[in-house]
Image (spheres, rainbow, N blue to C red):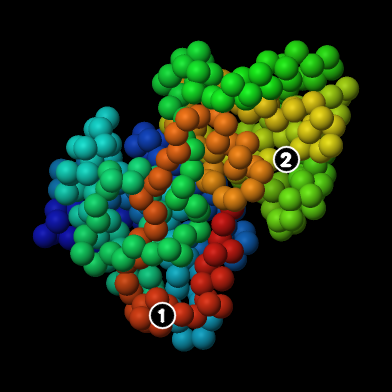
Amino acid sequence: MVLDEQRFSVSVCQDANEWDRLVNQLGGHPLQLWGWGELKRKYGWGATRLIVSSGTGETVAVCQLLHKPLPGPLADYVYAPRGPVFLRDCVDAEQLAADPTPAAVADAIAEYVVKQQGAIAVAFEPDEEQGTLTLGQKWRQTAQAVLPPETLVLDLRNTPEQLLGEMSKKHRQYIRKSEREPGLTVRPVETLEELRRCLEIYRTTSERAGFDLRTDSYYEDVFTLLGDGAPVWASYYEDEPVAFLFMAKSRRVAFELYGGMNETGQRLRANYALKWHVIQWMREQGVTRYDFGGLVEGGVTTFKKGFAKHLNQLVGTFDYPGRGYLLWSKGLPLAKRVAKKLGR
């Protein structure tokens, strides 16, 4: 589909290696990688990967869209987790906000999807800070977010000393204490059997904190389908895992997916040394943006907030209206719950 008025063309990518190359080249989020779409496809969603090119053939954006039919007469709900990924060219926030290209690109993607798929809505949740991105007049800001817009992001271009300096005094103390704990080590989780031992901890954590889990096979599929894009690390005490951190990773962005610890891990404060180890490892890999995966109420958020003196607010969720959008926007809680289950 060619949009002459915008001098953009939109095409479908069907090559996994080429797709991931483009996402990484443009500095995209790991939830835009091919493997994340394949994961969702396995659990009843569709996945479409779109490349937006300028009139000169330059790739100006990519966007992985997940879609699922809604109940009754409604058309598909289409959602871009932390997308689209816009060409950055190392621009700063003010330049991105002033550049009309991202807004025009977002329109081009949404118009393509509405015309080709008859979507009820196209929802974007870009990995962009609040105030850095302006979309066109047709877009509607919505509170119906899949991923929380409030989060904590570390700039890993900073030195380890600078990162430590941004933490609370208690966090620095607990990191040093847990690093010196005899018998406590941190190492990567490399096999499904090792992952299953971590998932036992996750079940314990969910019971203690009162949140729901997916089946073990889902987390095993994340681990398998994302491959190097889903590194897992665990703290071990006397060769038994006591805490774990399950990440999603692209070239530029690290994003926390899941994590937990058991009673021994709590006693040893194993999660402090573990998270600091993963942050440093990501920095060594060239990752520059470390996202704590969102902030919600509870003890986990209190723990996260101690790693920096600031919080980050992303631009949030925007809907582009499609066929039947009025019904969608005015209610239909069942349909919205279907969309909400997309999650992680």
145 above or below 234? below
Identity, as a three-letter code, of the amino acid under mark 2: Gly
Residue depicted at x 71% and y 56%: 211
Question: Where is residue 35 shown, x and y percent of the image?
Answer: 55, 46
Count of picture labels: 2
Residue 302 at least partly seen: yes
Q: Helix, strand or loop at disc 2?
A: strand
Residue 89 or residue 191, whichever sits in front? 89
Q: Tell me where residue 100 appears, x and y as whole percent.
A: 17, 49
Q: Residues within 10 Å of mark 1 (few under 14, many from 20)?
A: few
Task: Report the residue at 39% width, 47% height from top.
Answer: 314
* The furthest residue to the right: 238
Rendered location of residue 168, percent (x, y): 56, 25
Identify residue for label 1. Answer: 330
Residue 300 is marked as none
Q: Is residue 282 left or right of residue 83?
A: right
| Nearer to us in this view, 319 or 68 | 319
Q: Residue at x 47, y 16 (%)?
A: 162
Q: Is residue 247 visible?
A: no
Q: Earlier in the sequence, mark 2 or mark 1?
A: 2
- Label 2 sits on residue: 260
Instruction: Tell me where residue 222 appears, x and y as whole percent.
Output: 64, 46
Q: Is residue 239 left or right of residue 137?
A: right
Badge 2 crowding class, 10 Å Cα cut-off, few under 14, some 14 to 19, many 20 or more, is many
Label 1 amino acid? Lys
Q: Mark 2 near mark 1, Cβ–Cβ under 8 Å?
A: no
